[in-house]
Image (tube, grey):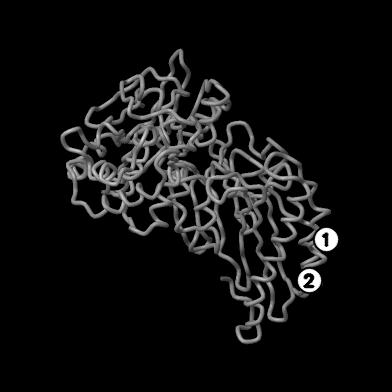
Amino acid sequence: MRQSVRFYLGERLVSLDDVAPEQTLLDWLRHEGRTGTKEGCNEGDCGACTVVVARLRGDRVVLRAVNACIQLLPMLDGAALFTIEDVGSAGALHPVQEAMVTFNGAQCGFCTPGFVMSMVAYRNADERPDDDAAIDSALSGNLCRCTGYAPIVRAMKQALAAPDSPFETALPALGAKLEALQDGEDVAIETSHGAIFLPASAASLARYLQEHPETLIVAGATDVGLWVTKAMRPLPRVAFIGQCPDLMRLECDDEGLHIGAAVTYDAAREALAALLPDFGALVGRIGSTPIRNSATLCGNIANGSPIGDGPPALIAAGAMLHLRRGAEKRVIPLERYFLAYGKQDRQAGEFVEAVTIPPLAEGTFYRSYKISKRFDQDISAVLAAFALRVDKEGIVQEARLAFGGMAATPCRAERAEAVLIGAKWHEATLEAARLALAEDFTPLNDMRASAWYRQTVAANLLTRFFEESQGETMRLAKAGGLAHV
């Protein structure tokens, strides 16, 4: 068992054996003199603090942009960290920096280091289209109040066409350094600042939680990070699971798509999109690129938020949740995990190990819809996801209508489902289901939406689902059933 957190800061190997669990990466960097990384919103929205984290994935070094303000320092174990000071110098600017100068991509300069780091990560991505939409998505986590985005997008396009810089040519050699850090050991640190545990396996995590059931589990810290930066909460004992190999499994077999507790939204997006229509687009609206590089699907489930975007879409798909306590494992339908506001079906020392999404049954029509004030980077007022299985006669055999933002937990509209099952899928049935939704939910009024708005939107989304399903229904006679799309 190791008793230190190890990572590279640029070329320098860092080893820390006295670190607080709630120490943010941003604060540590600035105390280290890396002041190019700025503090803006301190909640992962503005991107002024963006840095690049490099990790070994198989035999490849993969670069990801993340928000330093809500990354907790122990999460860097086994990685290489790069800030604006690492990518170029006054006499030898990185191609991204050169392009930003050429196209006047900066004015006050406060946000510029974060933009540059996001651009460096995109330049080194596996896929890096030079169209505006792809670049806008890559830079979605960076805000600029001075320059505007057009010059920055033009700079990104020029940088994509530029030859490798010394920064890029040094990356292959980084793989050997990162390989040397992968020792397969648990990391346990106990100091006056608190306790830190980084498990090397799910079994190690299970044992640790049995001994310390009060432990807070952190994967991506995109939620917990705000507990620290906004609520100033101390974190006495934390298990950081984001790099636990057993929990990073992403596999698809006959039972469906298996997503481990440490799999990020970015890593799962392609597989989710292949399995469930609309889910890829939905993931693209969850936070920004740096957030999706850190946030995990299972973390979105585990914290039990009534407005999390992932759970309703998974509930409609019939997802099953895998829970573990010591050597004991159990599997439950996802909707049963959410008991009440702030209360989940999880015992002391038990943790979410994975979620499995089964393939859609033949004849199932699935859609998910997110309604928010802003299209990007906004919390949902209503998240609706629907799955309907209709036979060749047009009779509804199965209905799963799931919502977020309508109640104290993500949940199904059971009365509306009961109206649908056994009925013919046509306008009269739709209207009856719309009316039943009013009995299923009593939404709250809050800053995001009124109760009336939520109730109206929920019913209207069901109508939209009906209209979109009709093209498939028309093919029933020829196809012998409603094909899932």
Q: Quadrant of residue 307?
A: top right
| Residue neighbourhood size for the residue with mark 1, other residues' Cα within 10 Å, grouped as few (<14), some (14–19), many (≥20) | some
Q: Earlier in the sequence, mark 1 or mark 2?
A: 2
Q: What is the secondary structure assignment of the residue under circle 1?
A: helix
Task: Name the spot of residue 35 as percent of width and height, x first.
Answer: 33, 25
Q: What is the secondary structure assignment of the residue under circle 2?
A: loop
Between marks 1 and 2 in the image, the one whose residue lies nearer the viewer: 1
**Residue closer to the observer: 182 or 22:** 22
Task: Name the spot of residue 52 as percent of width and height, x first.
Answer: 34, 38
When the figure is inspected, residue 44 is found, relative to residue 298, above or below; the finding is above
The amino acid type found where label 1 is placed reads Leu
**Measured Cα–Cα span from mark 1 to mark 2:** 17 Å
The amino acid type found where label 2 is placed reads Gly
Task: Name the spot of residue 341 as percent of width and height, x first.
Answer: 71, 37
Task: Name the spot of residue 478 as percent of width and height, x first.
Answer: 61, 87
Residue at 48%, 63% (x, y): give it. Answer: 274
Which residue is disc 1 drawn over? 435
